[in-house]
Image (cartoon, rainbow, N blue to C red):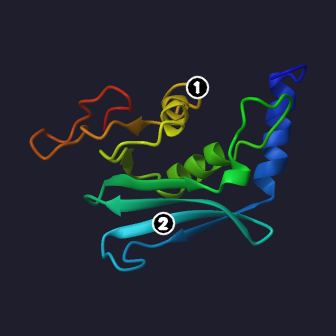
Amino acid sequence: MSDLTAEDWAERDRVARDALKVKVHPFGYGRYPKRGMVELLRDGVRIGTVSISEETDWLIETVRIDVKPEFRFRKDLDGYQERWALFLMQALFESFPDHEIRESPAINDAPGDPFVARVRGEYELSYHLSGCFQPSNDGSCVCGAGRSRA
């Protein structure tokens, strides 16, 4: 984080978030009836999207998380950078507060794995593993990565 304090990052994150528009495309968006999308925009420019699939009335699975390359966090740079991918995931969780959200079973791109780990750990979003909430269980969390369903 260089010489910036956690409070500096929090304030800069707040300013960056205030400039964002979240657009939620409802289920049935596009060609697939159970698909939807959360889109993050700044000044009308798309920063990224997360495509989702409604598995049940309480469960959503991410299909694809896509942040345009110019908005991706670069660890080789020092100082504050907007954490657009984090803001996108937070928008997803805020847009569907009554749903549990699990990761797709598809393989992540290699740079996506550390991001997903941060979403679960450092950013403390309850993003479940793909094997969680399988039809064979009673609807409770079996992965341990997310919170248990109430």
Pick out the residue farthest to the left.
136
Pick out the residue farthest to the right.
3
Disc 1 packing (10 Å; few <14; some 14–19; many ≥20): few
Count up the numbered dots. 2
At 36% from the left and 68% from the top, the residue drawn is 35
Disc 2 packing (10 Å; few <14; some 14–19; many ≥20): many
Q: Nearer the viewer, residue 98 or 4?
A: 4
The percent position of residue 141, horizontal first and vertical second, equals: 26, 34
For the C terminus, the quadrant is top left
Q: Can you see residue 33?
A: yes
> Is 86 placed above or below 71 here?
above
Q: Mark 1 points at which residue?
A: 122
The percent position of residue 105, horizontal first and vertical second, equals: 29, 45
The span from disc 2 to disc 1 (Cα, nearest Å) is 24 Å
For the N terminus, the quadrant is top right
Q: In this view, does 80 lie to the left or right of 90?
A: right
> Is 79 placed above or below 130 here?
above
The first of marks 2 and 1 along the sequence is: 2
Q: In this view, does 33 lie to the left or right of 110?
A: left
- Label 1 sits on a secondary structure element that is loop
Q: Mark 2 points at which residue?
A: 37
The image's mark for residue 28 is: none
- Residue type at mark 1? Glu
Q: What is the quadrant of residue 82 in the picture?
A: top right
Q: What is the quadrant of residue 42 in the picture?
A: bottom right
The percent position of residue 40, horizontal first and vertical second, equals: 64, 61
Q: Which of 53 and 77 is in front in this view?
A: 77
